Amino acid sequence: MNDTQLLRYSRHILLDAIGIEGQQQFLDAHVLIIGAGGLGSPAALYLAAAGVGRMTLVDHDTVDLTNLQRQILHTHERVGLPKAQSGQSTLAQLNPEVAVTALVERAEGARLQELVAAADVVLDCSDNFATRHAVNVACRQARVPLVSGAVDRFDGQLTVFDARDDASPCYGCLFPPEQRAEDQACATMGVFAPVVGIIGTMQAAEALKLIAGITPSLAGRLLLFDARNMSMSSLAVSRNPACSVCG
């Protein structure tokens, strides 16, 4: 690290659990973020601010006026532009040292597997079950830890699936892919804006902990957040020996 970096990240370096070594791990890391919307926005902002050296933003969608209520990577002037490119511009202004790759595509199949295998940590910030299951499979195959977040109206949930640990459950253990679940679009159900900020920020926190080896992570626990009551609870999640993905 140079003198500017030592100053910029000094508040991290002061933490015994991070220090210079941990901050260097952030600078050397590559994080893949699937989705540059409500969850991906705060997650990407905090990861860039923290000095994660390389980030890949994947999103096939464009910025819509209705996104601006909660998707804080984007601005009014960027309505109609690809979300990945809009996010790249915002992150460059926040921290020009971070190398951000913007992919305007829906990553699937071999392409998704390639992107996951190149990352140190993956953040699933998508909004549909098909993508979540696909990302889970790719992370399991590549043995890359996955930080999974989701939001529904006033509620949020967060967990870590650490494929490096054979005893850790995967997304399929919690939501079996053979049990078809119905997606609930925020366009019809609505979403309380701060909830995506809270869950997305916690996704960034878990990702940084995984990079720096700060334990324990949320692996094996599902964190549930209720914004109406402003309460949090957690449930134990075990690996399912009959899981069609990791069993």
Image (cartoon, helix red, strand yellow):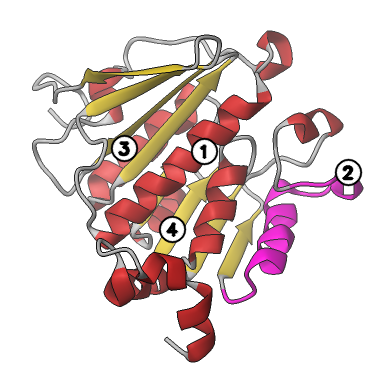
* Residue with the mark numbered 4: 31
| Distance CA(mark 1)–CA(mark 2) | 21 Å
* Residue with the mark numbered 1: 200
Question: Local crowd at mark 4 within 10 Å, few (<14), some, or many (≥20)?
Answer: many
Q: Earlier in the sequence, mark 3 or mark 4?
A: 4
* Residue with the mark numbered 3: 137
| Distance CA(mark 4)–CA(mark 1) | 14 Å
Question: Local crowd at mark 3 within 10 Å, few (<14), some, or many (≥20)?
Answer: many
> Does dot 4 land on a helix, a strand or a loop?
strand
Q: Position of residue 133 (x, y in %)?
A: 38, 29
Q: Which amino acid type corresponds to the residue marked 3 in the rendered image? A: Val
> Does dot 2 land on a helix, a strand or a loop?
helix
Q: Earlier in the sequence, mark 4 or mark 2?
A: 4
Q: Which amino acid type corresponds to the residue marked 4 in the rendered image? A: Val
What range is drawn magenta here?
74-97
| Residue at x-position 91% and y-position 49% | 77
Question: Local crowd at mark 1 within 10 Å, few (<14), some, or many (≥20)?
Answer: many
| Distance CA(mark 3)–CA(mark 4) | 17 Å
| Distance CA(mark 4)–CA(mark 2) | 27 Å
* Magenta span dominant secondary structure: helix
